Amino acid sequence: MKDLVLSPSHRCPRVWQIPWTLSRLTISGLLSVLSCTLQSCDAGSRPANHVVGRQPVRIHSPEPESVSGLSQWHLTETLRIPVTGSLEPGLIESVDDIATDKRGVIYLLDRRNKKIVQFDSRGKFVRVVPRSRILQDPIGIATDRVGRLWIVDPAGPRYLRVDSSGEAQSFARSVRGYSVPWRGGIAKDGQFYDVSLTNAAGSPQEIVIYDTDLHIVRAVRIPKLSTVQTFTFGREPYTTTASVPFTGELLWSYDGDQRIWIANSAEYSLFVLDLKGDTLNIIDRSYQSIPIKDAERDSAIRALSWFVRSGGRIAENRIPTVHPALRALFLDGNLFVWVVPRTDRDHAEAQFDVFTSAGQLTAIVHVGRQLITNPLPRIVNGFLYAAIKDSLGRIDIARFQISRK
């Protein structure tokens, strides 16, 4: 589940956590929204009615049966850290974010237990960080150029910057709300950036970029692609809301420089935007929809039993008959864009469609593992770090070396 959460002062009495889901859109409708709603919030921002100044380039990827000429990439597992059945009981029970530095030091965020566990490049436990501070609700982590760990703890509200000794320095967090999984990080120029909500639940997210003194220097709005698809009952402000299963969600990633990649997971179309609001490229790829099985549908409805017990009603005819096309979208620095499409083999292995920064499909990569996309996978120095699950449901963190031929 993707969480979209307001800071306490902006919460409605009974709406504490609202999953972000999106309805299916036509390509033309989506492009219209993207062209007109994304705008920079710095001093040089354009007016709200800004329309894209030039026609975006549309790129059609090869058909699935025509990809034999693509370069062959391989993933070789080089490390595994147990999460379920950890070698040290109680050390870590869940993983909500992954961070790693150029030396291969690995940090795993356990949001449930409010701690971050550090491992060395060989997977050996080092310590729990930070040493001397109690985390209230950590939602995201990242490492900067010099190997310091950044922690986003919006319940503080604060950021913590942890040095190599494990000691932490605290900074106030002035932006409101947050989304999970956290999509902030360290920009190409070394600046830290975070993600916030602009107003109320369901409103657009913003990329908030800081200088070295943690002063906000720029805020860039991520477009709200469509009305959130929810089941709702009650009257404002006392409403109870649940997301409609399988309706898709907003996927996006910032390259830390000048571009944002964005998609509605319900369709296999990627949009590349600059920070001024122009849509530069649209990348389409043929996709075979995966039908939702009766057992999956029934399970999703059972998961909403809390909503029914509260007095809500499930309109089953609003639940789609096919899965969203995409599971995840993340970047490999400024070089490649990794897309995780939904396939009929997700229970056994994951597929990655890899695009260049110019939008060309360059490789299709398979990993013979079931992939978990929350936390989002990370790529650093030619290694992919991801959460995987085996046939018994046990979860590990694995490191894969990426071989490109």
Image (cartoon, rainbow, N blue to C red):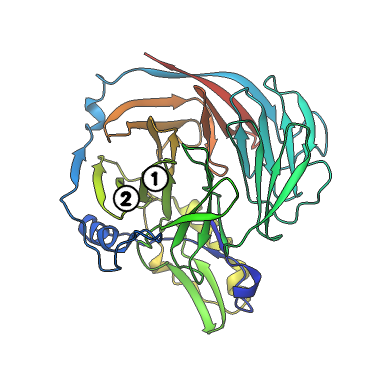
Residue at image coords 42%, 67%: 229
Q: Nearer the viewer, residue 199 or 235?
A: 199
On the image, the x and y values in percent for residue 111 come to: 70, 49
State the mark number for residue 326.
1
Residue at image coords 52%, 38%: 190
On the image, the x and y values in percent for residue 44 come to: 34, 58
Residue topped by disc 2: 267
On the image, the x and y values in percent for residue 163 come to: 72, 36
Q: Nearer the viewer, residue 174 or 386?
A: 174
Identify residue type, mark 1: Leu
Location of the C terminus by quadrant is top left
Local SS, label 2:
loop
Q: Quick check: 30 left or right of 243?
A: left
On the image, the x and y values in percent for residue 309 come to: 63, 74
Identify residue type, mark 2: Glu
- State which tag comes first along the sequence, 2 or 1: 2
